[in-house]
Image: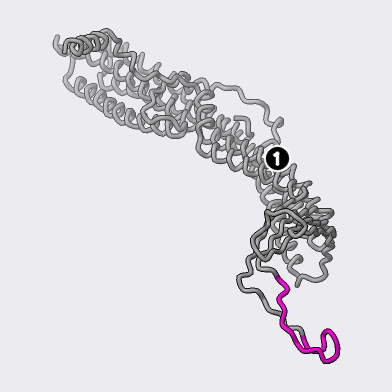
C-alpha cells in the first residue's frame, strides 16, 4: 500500500505547486475588425451559404456532363421454367399440312450487352453551357453577400457594448465627484457650517447614480452575451473590447461620389440572376428546336437447355449482336406547353429587373439620408460639447461662490448635476455619430 500513498502525496504536492491561474480561461482581446472577422468565420449562416455555393458549383459541373458519353453495361439471365408453346397454323408447310405445336425458346437464356448514348445536338445543352459561367459567378456572389450581411449586422452589437461600458465609467466618475463633494460638506456640517439638506441631496444623487450603474451593468452583461452570440463563440468566453466609441465617431469618411450601387454584393446577385433568367428563357424556347442523339450497343447472347453458360465448345456458342443509329427528335406541337413556360420565365425575369430598379433607388436615397444623418449627429455632438463647456463654467462659478459663502448649496449641486448630465449627453451623441457613420459605410458596401 505504500506506493499508493506516495502517488497521492506526489499529486497533492503538484496541485499545491501549480498556479491556479494556469487553468483560467484566456481573455480574448478584440477590436471591431478582429471581432467581425471571428463573427464571419464562425457564422452558421455563412457556413450554410458556403455549402449552398458548393452545391451550385456541382450543379454547374452537372450541366457540363450532360454532353458527355453515357456508357452502360448489363447482364440479363432468364429461366423459362414454363416455356411458351406456339401453334403453327394449318397449311403452313404445304397444302393440307395439319396444325402443330412448337416451342421456340430454351429454358435458359443469358444476354450481356454494352450501350453507348451520345448527345450530338440539343440547343438546350448549348444554352446550359453558356449559363454555367453565370452559375459559378452566382456561387461566389452569394458567399460574398452572406459575409456582407454578417458584417452589416455585427457593428451595432459591438458599438452598443462600448457605449454601455463607457456610460458606466462616466457614471462612476460622476459618483466619485459627488462623493468628494459629500465628504467636504460632511466636514463643514460637522464643524457647524453646513446644512443637512445639502448632505441629503448629495446622498440622494449618489444613490440615484448607483441605481443607474446597477441597471447599466445588467444591460452590459446582456449586450456582451448578445455579442458572443453574434460571434458564435462560447457563452462563457472572456472578452475585452480594446477600442472606444470616440475612435469610430472621429473616423474620416470618403467622398460620396466614389461609390456606385453596382459595387454592392446585393446588386451582383440580382445581375447574375438576370443572366440566368435569360438563359432559362432561351432553354424554354430551345424545346421547340430539333435534337439529335447517337446510340449504339453491342452484346452476346446464348440459349441453353440447361444452365451451362460457362462451358466452352461448338455446342455452347455465344452469338454476337450489335446496332448503331441516331435519333432525331422534331417537336411539332406540344399543346402550347412551351409557350406557357416561356411566358412564365419572361415574367420572372421582369420581376428580377424590378428588383434591380428597387435596389438602385434604395441606394440613391440611402446615400442622401445617411449623409444627412452623419451631418445631424455631428451637429448634435458639437452642441453637446458646447453645452458641457457652459455647464462646467457655471459649476466653477457656483463652486467659487459657495466657497466664499455667497452661494447656496442647492445651486452648487444643481450646477454639478447639470455638468454630469451634459457629459453623459456627449457620450450619447458620440455613440449616435458612430452609428451614423457605420450606416453611411454600410449603405455604400465598404464595411
Q: Within the magenta stretch, is there residue 331?
A: no
Q: Where 336 sits versus 353, above or below?
A: below
Compared across the picture, whether 424 is left or right of 349 comes to: left
Q: Nearer the viewer, residue 385 or 135?
A: 135
Secondary structure found at label 1: helix
The answer to whether one can see residue 382 in this image is no
> Residue 385 location in percent, x, y?
47, 22
The residue under label 1 is 137
Q: Quadrant of the C terminus?
A: top right
The residue located at (42%, 31%) in the rendering is: 228
What secondary structure characterizes most of the magenta part?
loop
The part of the chain drawn in magenta is 89-105
The residue located at (63%, 69%) in the rendering is: 80
- Within 10 Å of disc 1 (Cα), the crowding (few <14, some 14-19, many 20+) is some
> Residue 236 location in percent, x, y?
36, 28
Q: Nearer the viewer, residue 186 or 285?
A: 285
Q: Within the magenta stretch, is there residue 102?
A: yes
> Residue 336 location in percent, x, y?
76, 70
Instruction: Give residue 404's quadrant in the image.
Output: top left
> Residue 153 location in percent, x, y?
52, 36
Amino acid at each position: 500500500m505504500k506506493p499508493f500513498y506516495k502517488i497521492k502525496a506526489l499529486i497533492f504536492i503538484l496541485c499545491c505547486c501549480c498556479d491556479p491561474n494556469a487553468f483560467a480561461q484566456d481573455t480574448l482581446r478584440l477590436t471591431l475588425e478582429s471581432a467581425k472577422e471571428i463573427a464571419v468565420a464562425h457564422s452558421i449562416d455563412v457556413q450554410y451559404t458556403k455549402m449552398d455555393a458548393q452545391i451550385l458549383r456541382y450543379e454547374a459541373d452537372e450541366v457540363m456532363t450532360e454532353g458527355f458519353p453515357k456508357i452502360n453495361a448489363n447482364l440479363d439471365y432468364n429461366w423459362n421454367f414454363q416455356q411458351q408453346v406456339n401453334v403453327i397454323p394449318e397449311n403452313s408447310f404445304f397444302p393440307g399440312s395439319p396444325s402443330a405445336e412448337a416451342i421456340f425458346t430454351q429454358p435458359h437464356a443469358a444476354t450481356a450487352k454494352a450501350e453507348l448514348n451520345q448527345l450530338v445536338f440539343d440547343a438546350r445543352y448549348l444554352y446550359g453551357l453558356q449559363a454555367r459561367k453565370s452559375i459559378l459567378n452566382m456561387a461566389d456572389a452569394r458567399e460574398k453577400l452572406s459575409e456582407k450581411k454578417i458584417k452589416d449586422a455585427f457593428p451595432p452589437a459591438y458599438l452598443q457594448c462600448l457605449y454601455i461600458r463607457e456610460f458606466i465609467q462616466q457614471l462612476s466618475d460622476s459618483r466619485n465627484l459627488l462623493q468628494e463633494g459629500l465628504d467636504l460638506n460632511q466636514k463643514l456640517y460637522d464643524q457647524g457650517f453646513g446644512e443637512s439638506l445639502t448632505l441629503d441631496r448629495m446622498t440622494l444623487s449618489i444613490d440615484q447614480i448607483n441605481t443607474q450603474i446597477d441597471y447599466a451593468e445588467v444591460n452590459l452583461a446582456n449586450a456582451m452575451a448578445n455579442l458572443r452570440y453574434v460571434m458564435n463563440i462560447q457563452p462563457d468566453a472572456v472578452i475585452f473590447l480594446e477600442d472606444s466609441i470616440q475612435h469610430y465617431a472621429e473616423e474620416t469618411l470618403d467622398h460620396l461620389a466614389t461609390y456606385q450601387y453596382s459595387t454592392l454584393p446585393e446588386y451582383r446577385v440580382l445581375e447574375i440572376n438576370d443572366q440566368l433568367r435569360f438563359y432559362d428563357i432561351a432553354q424554354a424556347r430551345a424545346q421547340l428546336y430539333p435534337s439529335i442523339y447517337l446510340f449504339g450497343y453491342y452484346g452476346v447472347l446464348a440459349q441453353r437447355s440447361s444452365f451451362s453458360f460457362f462451358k466452352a465448345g461448338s455446342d455452347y456458342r455465344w452469338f454476337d449482336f450489335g446496332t448503331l443509329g441516331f435519333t432525331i427528335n422534331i417537336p411539332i406541337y406540344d399543346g402550347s406547353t412551351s409557350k406557357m413556360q416561356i411566358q412564365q420565365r419572361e415574367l420572372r425575369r421582369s420581376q428580377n429587373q424590378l428588383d434591380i430598379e428597387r435596389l438602385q433607388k434604395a441606394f440613391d436615397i440611402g446615400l442622401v439620408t445617411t449623409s444627412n444623418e452623419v451631418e445631424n449627429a455631428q451637429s448634435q455632438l458639437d452642441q453637446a460639447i458646447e453645452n458641457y463647456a457652459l455647464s462646467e463654467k457655471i459649476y466653477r462659478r457656483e463652486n467659487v461662490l459657495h466657497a466664499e459663502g455667497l452661494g447656496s448649496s442647492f445651486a452648487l449641486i444643481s450646477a454639478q448635476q447639470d455638468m454630469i448630465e451634459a457629459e453623459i449627453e456627449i457620450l450619447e451623441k458620440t455613440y449616435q455619430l458612430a452609428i451614423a457613420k457605420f450606416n453611411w459605410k454600410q449603405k455604400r458596401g465598404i464595411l
